[in-house]
């Protein structure tokens, strides 16, 4: 047996679809559309259940980038490509994974890692 | 009814009965009077009051007159005797002379039922009446003793208001190499207790009210999980690094450092990259981030979190800001050098210090073990060799104790009603190893600031720990090729600051 303490079911966390944007694409949250540097637009309306949210994983970097406050490093630029599609509680992420993967703005889509604590459960 | 009170209002106070438990909450039960009738008094009782045969009726009446002065909530047998059993005592008591002597009782012999039948429990509606009622009843001829029942305190190793017990002797990881990291010796150097350094622990829950943690540990982002297992874990991690030095509890490796915490759960979902980025934005050069998480990789074994691209980039970005990131390697018994991990974060340098779990000198199972291959009470292996569950590979840098680390939480070493005084002797995994290294990093950075006026770069910190650490050992089935790295040796490391 390998020691691990899983996230309790009682936490009632949602499982998002994790996406990595293709280079040159960004998400405009005000219009809820993906936009590419070449002017392409992809609107995911109808692709997702009502009340779904599409969010950047590191929103503070988005603000910094937009404000031009800092020259982002390569690592930060890479971070800016990572987003989450947070679905309503009764909508399983796995059901939407293939559809999201096919979006023209998406390079990769996956379910998030099943995180746990690297310690043994207690008591034995 | 008495008010619910906390005995901790009287910290350190020794009562007539002994030390008062520091965190025990007195149950909300009323004060009541216990009356012990004389063996030779042929008096019985029911919920309505006392009664006796004609010859002893004055004794019962006297008792009832006392009761009549008070508002009585209940009157019953203290030992739960039924009415029939209580009435039976009248016959036995009548066999004794009016002024019976001990020899009379011995001659007849007394069974437990008879003795218990003379114990009466009287609950006044006003708890404040209990002492007066007891005094008056005690003066009556049928009564041998009457007193207010003692209030309960837990009979567990809960420490006392004299303080929780001192667990520092069990913190072997503080001791000199090769057993520990030599923290105690290093503390003699100015700044080497983590002065001026902030440590941010990223996981999911903590008990920030623990008695041995400094006050004001701030949650800088995310949402805490309401789960005891996760809360114990976070508390244990903090305890290794920043528990307060005193005559009780434990002492943290870098107890002069400031601690903050960041949850990896943001907007109701797991988002470690977001947590890392947020934490890094709130820390300064020379500070430390600890990642206390793992997740299954492509072989369905637990791996370090830098396997995932976004998390790897977040670590790189934090490290570039001069923040040292310490990361648990994970408990997957996984080899990070396998081809399946090519071009992933497990075969690239994120800048983090990746920590494996080594076997401590206290190297045995003290429970049922982990199955047939590792039965209870068997040896874990050679000290400083890889524990069977620790991940390994080229990206691992250093090790810490991965077994039986004494720290806060869980309650196996000291339990109580309140989590705030729980301690453990058994925190384990790369979870227990990583805070040891994190504490060592904070000590180094605190010393660097004090000595040089500036912290070291994260890469330098890592180099020093690897260069000066006590080497990894080989053991049966765990050769040195299964790299987890050396264990920090702070006195030697300080020489390179």
Image (cartoon, coloured by chain):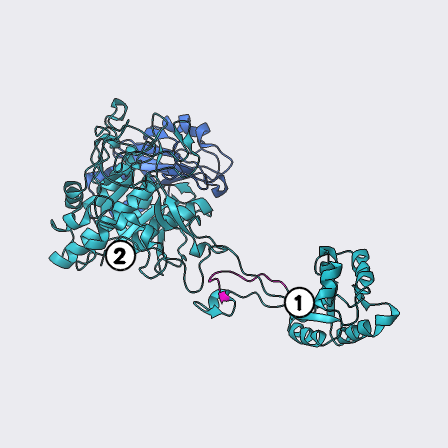
Chain colours: A blue, B cyan
Residue, far right: B54
Q: Is residue B19 magenta?
A: yes
Which x, y percent locates residue A112? 38, 34
SS assignment at label 2: loop
Which x, y percent locates residue B316? 22, 40
Question: Does mark 2 fall on the same chain as mark 1?
Answer: yes
Q: Residues within 10 Å of mark 1 (few under 14, many from 20)?
A: many
- The residue located at (66%, 72%) in the rendering is B130
* Residue A50 or residue B184, whichever sits in front: B184
Q: Residues within 10 Å of mark 2 (few under 14, many from 20)?
A: many
* Residue B169 or residue B85, whichever sits in front: B85
In this picture, residue A19 sits left or right of residue B469? right
In this picture, residue B178 sits left or right of residue B70? left
Which x, y percent locates residue B16? 51, 70
Q: Is residue A68 visible?
A: no
The quarter of the picture where residue B142 lies is bottom right
Which x, y percent locates residue B191? 19, 58
| Magenta stretch prevailing secondary structure | loop
Residue position marked by numbered label 1 in the rendering: B32
The tag on residue B77 is none
In this picture, residue B486 sits left or right of residue B293? left
Residue position marked by numbered label 2 in the rendering: B257
The quarter of the picture where residue B195 lies is bottom left
Q: Chain of mark 2?
A: B
**Which portion, as a residue range, is magenta?**
B18-29
- The residue located at (48%, 41%) in the rendering is A12
Q: Is residue A94 visible?
A: yes
> Which image quarter is the C terminus of chain A in?
top left
Q: Nearer the viewer, mark 1 or mark 2?
A: 1
Marks 1/2: CA–CA distance: 51 Å
């Amino acid at each position: 047996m390998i020691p691990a303490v899983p996230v309790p079911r009682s936490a009632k966390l949602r499982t998002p679809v994790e996406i990595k944007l293709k280079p040159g694409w960004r998400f405009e949250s005000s219009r809820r559309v993906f936009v590419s540097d070449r002017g392409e637009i992809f609107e995911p309306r109808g692709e997702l259940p009502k009340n779904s949210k599409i969010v950047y994983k590191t929103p503070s970097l988005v603000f910094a980038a937009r404000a031009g406050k800092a020259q982002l490093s390569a690592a930060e630029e890479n971070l800016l490509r990572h987003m989450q599609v947070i679905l309503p509680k009764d909508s399983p992420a796995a059901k939407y994974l293939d559809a999201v993967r096919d979006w023209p703005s998406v390079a990769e889509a996956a379910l998030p890692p099943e995180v746990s604590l690297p310690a043994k459960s207690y008591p034995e | 009814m008495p008010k619910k009170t906390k005995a901790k209002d009287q910290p350190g106070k020794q009562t007539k009965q002994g030390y008062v438990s520091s965190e025990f909450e007195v149950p909300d039960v009323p004060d009541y009077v216990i009356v012990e009738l004389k063996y030779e008094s042929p008096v019985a009782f029911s919920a309505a009051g006392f009664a006796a045969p004609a010859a002893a009726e004055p004794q019962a009446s006297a008792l009832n007159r006392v009761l009549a002065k008070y508002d009585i909530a209940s009157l019953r047998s203290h030992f739960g005797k039924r009415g029939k059993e209580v009435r039976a005592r009248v016959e036995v008591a009548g066999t004794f002379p009016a002024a019976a002597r001990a020899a009379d009782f011995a001659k007849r012999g007394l069974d437990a039922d008879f003795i218990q039948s003379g114990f009466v429990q009287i609950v006044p509606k006003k708890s404040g009446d209990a002492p007066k009622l007891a005094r008056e009843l005690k003066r009556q001829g049928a009564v041998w003793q009457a007193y207010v029942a003692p209030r309960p305190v837990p009979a567990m190793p809960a420490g006392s208001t004299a303080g929780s017990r001192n667990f520092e002797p069990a913190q072997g990881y503080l001791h000199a190499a090769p057993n520990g990291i030599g923290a105690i010796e290093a503390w003699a150097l100015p700044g080497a207790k983590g002065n001026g350094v902030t440590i941010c622990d990223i996981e999911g829950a903590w008990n920030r009210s623990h008695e041995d943690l400094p006050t004001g540990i701030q949650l800088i982002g995310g949402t805490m999980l309401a789960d005891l297992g996760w809360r114990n874990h976070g508390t244990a991690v903090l305890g290794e690094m920043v528990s307060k030095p005193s005559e009780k509890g434990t002492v943290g490796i870098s107890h002069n450092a400031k601690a903050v915490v960041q949850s990896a759960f943001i907007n109701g979902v797991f988002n470690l990259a977001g947590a890392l980025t947020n934490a890094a934005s709130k820390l300064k050069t020379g500070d430390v981030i600890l990642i206390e998480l793992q997740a299954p990789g492509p072989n369905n074994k637990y791996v370090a979190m830098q396997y995932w691209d976004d998390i790897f980039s977040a670590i790189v970005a934090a490290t570039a800001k001069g923040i040292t990131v310490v990361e648990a390697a994970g408990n997957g018994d996984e080899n990070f050098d396998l081809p399946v991990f090519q071009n992933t974060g497990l075969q690239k340098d994120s800048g983090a210090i990746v920590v494996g779990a080594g076997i401590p000198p206290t190297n045995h199972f003290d429970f049922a073990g982990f199955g047939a291959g590792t039965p209870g009470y068997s040896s874990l292996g050679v000290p400083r060799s890889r524990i069977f569950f620790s991940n390994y590979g080229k990206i691992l840098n250093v090790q810490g104790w991965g077994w039986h680390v004494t720290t806060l939480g869980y309650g196996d070493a000291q339990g109580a009603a309140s989590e705030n005084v729980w301690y453990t002797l058994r925190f384990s995994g790369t979870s227990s190893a990583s805070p040891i290294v994190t504490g060592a990093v904070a000590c180094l950075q605190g010393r660097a600031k004090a000595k040089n006026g500036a912290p070291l770069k994260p890469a330098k910190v890592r180099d020093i720990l690897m260069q000066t650490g006590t080497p990894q050992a080989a053991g049966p089935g765990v050769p040195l090729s299964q790299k987890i790295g050396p264990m920090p040796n702070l006195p030697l490391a300080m020489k390179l600051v």
